[in-house]
Image (cartoon, coloured by chain):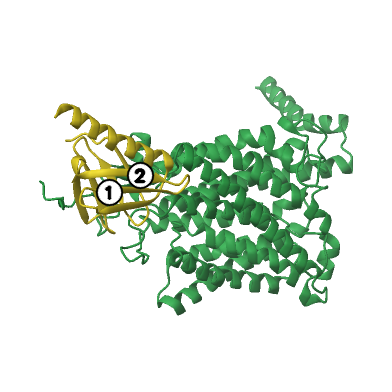
Amino acid sequence: MRRLGLLLTATLALVLALPAVALAQEEMSPAEIGATMDTMWVMVAFVLVLFMQAGFAMLEVGFSRMKNVGNVVAKILANMAVGALVFWAIGFGIAFGAGTPFFGLEGWFLSGNIDAGTIPLSMLFIFQMAFALVALAILWGTMLERTKFSVYLIFAVIFVGIIYPMGAHWIWADDGWLAALGKQDFAGSTVVHLSAAMAALAGTIIVGPRLGRFDDNGRPQLIPGHNMPLAVLGVLILWLGWQGFNPGSTLAATTEIADIALTTNLAAAAGVLGAIIVCYLYRGHIDVGMAGNGAIAGLVAITATCAFVAPWASVVIGFIAGGVMYGTAVLMERMGIDDPVGAIAAHGMGGVWGTLSAGLFTTPELAEANGGLPGLFYGGGLTQLGVQAISMFSVAGFTFFASLAVFAVLKATIGIRVKPDQELNGLDISDHGSYGMSEGLVATDNYPGNGNGQYTEAPVKTPEGRS
Amino acid sequence: MESLIVQASGSGNNIIDVYPDRVELRSGWQSQNREAIDHRDISSVEVKGLVNCVLTLETNKGRLVRLENLALGEARKIKTSIELQKSRAAQQS
């Protein structure tokens, strides 16, 4: 018994003493501790941003019809795989490698000497990779339920490999031409959200609306999503993920992340209210999906300015973003553009307004700390607003026309739309061989013609007089 | 179940299906309009455009049926299938 006690005591002493011995042997300098803390913080932020993929999946599943949900989640998985590998191979180098003011010429497969600050290059890469994957997820939300799976994969290679990284290089690389002008885009309103929305707009124009989305006179007809709780869960996951998206963009564990988190969340809350109020004034009821998109629009808008504006300004930015988002969604419908999840309105107009709002609301103290000039409302004049406008038009224009060209080539060669019967019967069976949800959960609703439920054929007329 | 040779959708909820003996056109918000045209009643098929193609069918009675915003590959397949079916029917008769 006494021997056992001695053994236990000795073991306990060893266990307690070992970490101290290890620390004594490898004493870390304050700089090393700081770098470790920075890396840990960015790692946490990366996990949150990567988790946004689950948010996009739930959002898109909720807004889709039940017959397409397997296709939606398969597309998210496949795009994450393609996007991660392509961004590692060439995208990261074009975005952050040194080279020209328009694109980087080093850093292929993470080679070269890209400056990652206090964190390891691999940490910077996976954090930025998560951003690229977010852009890709935004883009495909608009083309749901009628796009060929192969188009998702091919365009993902071009978008994550070339189009997205070029916009990122212009704004975020040390030698980028918009960075040289003093462009303010802290976490990517322009780089991630606006560029993704512009690519999405190009794709949506080329692919055309879903069958049944507009009636015989061209008036929009609602194709309701099959599960609003899932859609709202998606929005909540995205809201959670944004705690890594914006505060994580400090790329360092500083006390500044608290202020950034504050502006981020205030803008999201105001975005929900902005969308709800405008929706109620316009339609007389509160659309759940639009309320969710209001949160996203507010978050997108504050993404550029989260480190530059005071809390009161973030509320104004978020509120206006929510309202503008709703107006844009209505306008898109009237123009005959079918965006099932409202991503063009939420991410596109959120990105436009967020980019411009930096030129209006940036405070002198935060501009001095984070770069650029104060905004118009703080006596900074029109200079910063002009830089923001130039960056907005150049990134949006480049992304839109480059994407339009790629989608046009794809349409003229392999085609980008599934066959009508595949679209009407759902992509789960035709593309993936099984239902995304249980076969017992058959949608029972009043939308048979546009494929929501069992498609029944109309009788055939023979106008030429034969039967 | 008849074998569908090729099908495509154009703008405005218009769908075209090509069968061995006829072309079927579906239109309307809920695909409520459906009509069939025998291959022998089609006098010509034309494809115009490169990205957003226009497929025009002309019947023997001079009626023109236009489908817009088709992909080039689909439009060409429809034209080829109709012409092939017509030539096969001609050889058989």
Q: State the image quarter where residue A266 is shown.
A: bottom right
Task: Report the residue at 69% width, 20% height from top.
Answer: A3
**In the image, residue A116 above or below residue A358:** above
Residue A384 image position (x, y, % from top left): 79, 67
Whether residue A437 is visible to the viewer of this picture, yes or no, is no
Which is more toward the observer, A353 or A265? A353
Residue A256 image position (x, y, % from top left): 77, 59
Q: The numbered mark 1 sits on a residue in which chain?
A: B
Q: Are marks 2 and 1 in contact (CB under 8 Å)?
A: yes
Identity, as a three-letter code, of the amino acid under mark 2: Glu
Q: Residue furthest top?
A: A3
Is A210 on the left-hand or right-hand side of A358?
left
Task: Report the residue at 85% width, 40% height from top.
Answer: A32
Point out the image quarter for the N terminus of chain A. Answer: top right
> Looking at the colours in the rendered structure, which chain would you say is drawn in yellow?
B
Task: Report the residue at 49% width, 72% height from top.
Answer: A276
Which is more toward the observer, A375 or A204? A204
Q: State the image quarter where residue A127 is shown.
A: top right
Callout 1 secondary element: strand
Identity, as a three-letter code, of the amino acid under mark 1: Glu
**In the image, residue A64 above or below residue A350:** above
Residue A23 image position (x, y, % from top left): 83, 33
Task: Report the residue at 23% width, 44% height from top.
Answer: B42
Residue B46's label in the rendered image is 2
Chain A colour is: green
Q: Earlier in the sequence, mark 2 or mark 1?
A: 2
Residue B58's label in the rendered image is 1
Residue B54 image position (x, y, % from top left): 39, 49
Q: Which class describes the residues within 10 Å of circle 2: few (<14), some (14-19), or many (20+)?
A: some
